[in-house]
Image: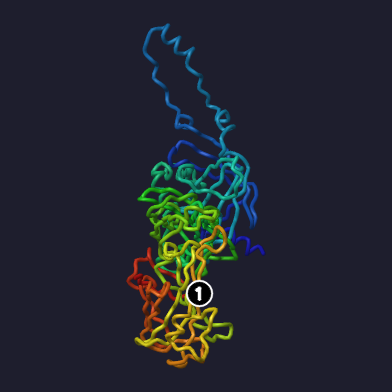
Amino acid sequence: MIKKLVLIILCIYGIQVNAQKTLPQGSTWYSYGVSDPSKALEITITHQDEIYMKVTRKLIATSTNSENPKKKKKKKGSFFKNLKNAVTEKPRSNNSSNKTKTSPLEGTFNYKVVSDNTDDGIYMDSYKYDEAVYGFVYPIGDGLYKEVVFTKDPSVHNFLKDENPATASVYIMGTDKEAVKAKAASLNADEELKKFYTPDYSTGRLKNPAVSFHSYNGRNFDIDPENGTIDLLQSTVYYLPSKTIEGRNIQYNWSAFNLKLFKDGKLVHKVIGQKGHRNGRWLEKVKNTFDMYGSFERVTPGKYQLTYSIYDNDPFFTIDFEVYTHANPDINHEIGTVYTMKGPWDENLSIDLRPDDQGNPTQFKTEFPLFRLLPLGNEKNQIQQLQSRLYKNGKLIGLTDSEEHPDGSATVKQALERRGSSIDLLYRKDKYQDSNRTEFHLISNSTKPSSWDWIRSLKDGNYKIEYLVNQKSFAEVTFTVKGNKIQLQGNQVKEGTDPKKYIMDESLILVPINYK
């Protein structure tokens, strides 16, 4: 147990085992402000264990003169002028306690030990001495540590800590008072903060993070058709970096993950994601899911860009989309003007070939986006017929399932005319139906399709799916099957695709749609 405790302490402070050094109770450290090197704090360790270290902080200097007093030159002037100045000037005080009583940097508080995001063990991560102040301490080499302290409005009752550079102060901390002071004086606060926020993408599983297609599609990124509010639910991101360029662990469970919405290049909204379910060292996993507590409220028609970034750095993923409106033809409907969006979600057909629990392929299913059909609906926001046809090497081989199955006497032509059913584009009073899920059936007999089988797998060949709206060709997709696998295409091919546009999905095939 003693060996384990010593090892933990050594890991916390980045001191090598062969140095045979620990931070015993009662030891004193010093901290100097980088932007103001004359400001010094004395930090005394009063207790430490495997969970936290309790310290007391005391402001010991706030000006250079308090440590290096110099004889002031006597002001020139008449006797009466000097007497007047002496009376009207506020007296100076060398007692630093007059200033430290109101300093939020002083007090007794804990440096908390938390699990590291990687395999480095545990380290001293964050501390808090009241609801308004919190910070980080981490090693920067030569026995020195960087402190980054943030302040927040204590009236805001939210544990979410916003690592806002505008509220940040940088300090250098260590036991050698002169070395700490010299280091702090040699640094630039802006440059040190930049190191604090800049991610090191080489510390991720892959160099470039990727965003799940479902993060910006369906219920995770959904527009309210009545007022244009975009609701957010969850975002799933792959291959996140774990550290900044100077080795600090990125705090994804605080405010590191950002979604920003731009219109015409201008930032209009920002939402901070929090880690949803943290189980152990979650960054070792390929993907991580964030809860998005917020929404992009009341967007107006126009072109937008959604960016995914770590802090305020350049985005690692972007989405271009358009918000548009049209008048609801149903005069009895509660919504008069309908908001909807065009984006990657309606530029790709989703094909589902996931296996079941036994590993057998499921039936061939597709999801066709309906966003662009809304202007084609009738006065009840309905499409009377949506048909799908599957071709292999130019030959019709399959039709989609529907409520009406053709009987044995029906010809293929009659079946084509009868298939499909009306689709309510607004299904519920306030929700826009975003996709139509279909299952293809194999035509066993080209003349009289009396027997129908689900298409459970696709053999090698060139395929096309044609979509017809009210018996008129509306859109089509093409894909190739090799080795019984659909070949990826478009932005779903990682090689050669801009990482900011790469379509990531674990189980679905996304095929680009060609609209007629």
Residue 231's x, y, as percent? 52, 56
Whether residue 58 appears in this view of the structure is yes
Whether residue 209 appears in this view of the structure is no
Q: Residue furthest right?
A: 1
Quadrant for the C terminus in the image: bottom left
Nearer to the camera, 383 or 309: 383
Residue 471's x, y, as percent? 41, 75
Nearer to the camera, 422 or 147: 422
Q: Is residue 359 above or below residue 23?
A: below
Local crowd size for mark 1, using a 10 Å CA cut-off: few (<14), some (14–19), many (≥20): some
The colour scheme used here is rainbow
Nearer to the camera, 430 or 483: 430
The residue sitting at 42% across, 51% down in the picture is 312
Residue 302's x, y, as percent? 38, 53
Q: Is residue 208 above or below residue 190?
A: below
Q: Which residue is mark 1?
A: 421
Q: Is residue 218 left or right of residue 304?
A: right
Quadrant for the N terminus in the image: bottom right
Residue 33's x, y, as percent? 47, 41
Q: Is residue 146 above or below residue 60?
A: below
Q: How many marks?
A: 1
Check disc 1 and give the amino acid type: Ser
Nearer to the camera, 210 or 514: 514
